[in-house]
Amino acid sequence: RLKRKLNEENCSLPYFEVHPRSKYNFSAAVLRRPMFIGDFSLNAKRQFCHDSRNLHYISIKWQIFKKVNYDLNVALDKANRKLFEETKNEKLDRLLEWILLNSFKFHTRESTGKPLK
């Protein structure tokens, strides 16, 4: 929560209230290396495709250029633009659709056969 405090010059300075360190006396979460578990893509009409058929890569010849120089205007005429009014309510729906179709990939040994929480 943001609060205000007076300093020596009687100026109001914003500060955040800090919780006691003892509140966080537990071990940090164990993070593993990221791993690929699947992909999906959207077609030109923004319909869900349960594969990578519409994914594209940027191809750069690193040995020739040896520096990053992205020109975002290259092939701009080939881009599939999405209409804001049609997609403003889309949010995470496509990602959640993929998760539901691939829920078996998220089970652990203990959760196999049980519904995901």
Image (cartoon, helix red, strand yellow):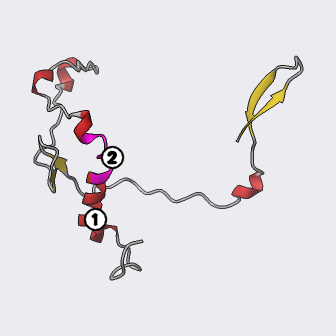
Q: CA distance from mark 1 to mark 2?
A: 16 Å
Residue 17 part of the magenta segment: no
Residue 112, picture quadrant: bottom left
* Secondary-structure class at tag 2: loop
Q: Is residue 51 left or right of residue 7?
A: left
Q: From the top left corner, tell me how far across and down residue 55 is, in percent.
A: 15, 43
Which numbered dot is residue 100?
A: 1
Q: From the top left corner, tell me how far across and down residue 74 is, in percent.
A: 16, 19
Residues shaded magenta? 87-93
Q: Residue at x 31, y 45 (%)?
A: 89
In the image as oriented, which residue stretches furthest toward the front?
A: 85
- Sequence order check, earlier mark of 1 and 2: 2
Q: Residue at x 43, y 57 (%)?
A: 32
Which residue type does callout 2 highlight? Lys
Q: Characterize the magenta stretch by its predominant secondary structure.
A: loop
Q: Is residue 27 above or below residue 14?
A: below
Q: Is residue 48 left or right of residue 12?
A: left
In the image as oriented, which residue stretches furthest toward the bottom?
A: 113
Q: Nearer the viewer, mark 1 or mark 2?
A: 2
User: Which sits in the foreground, 61 or 74?
Assistant: 74
Which residue type does callout 1 highlight? Leu
User: Which sits in the foreground, 104 or 117?
Assistant: 117
Q: Residue at x 26, y 34 (%)?
A: 84
Q: Residues within 10 Å of mark 1 (few under 14, many from 20)?
A: few
Q: From the top left corner, tell me how far across and down residue 48 is, in percent.
A: 17, 52
* Secondary-structure class at tag 1: helix
Q: Is residue 46 above or below residue 50?
A: above
Q: Residue beneath label 2, please?
A: 91
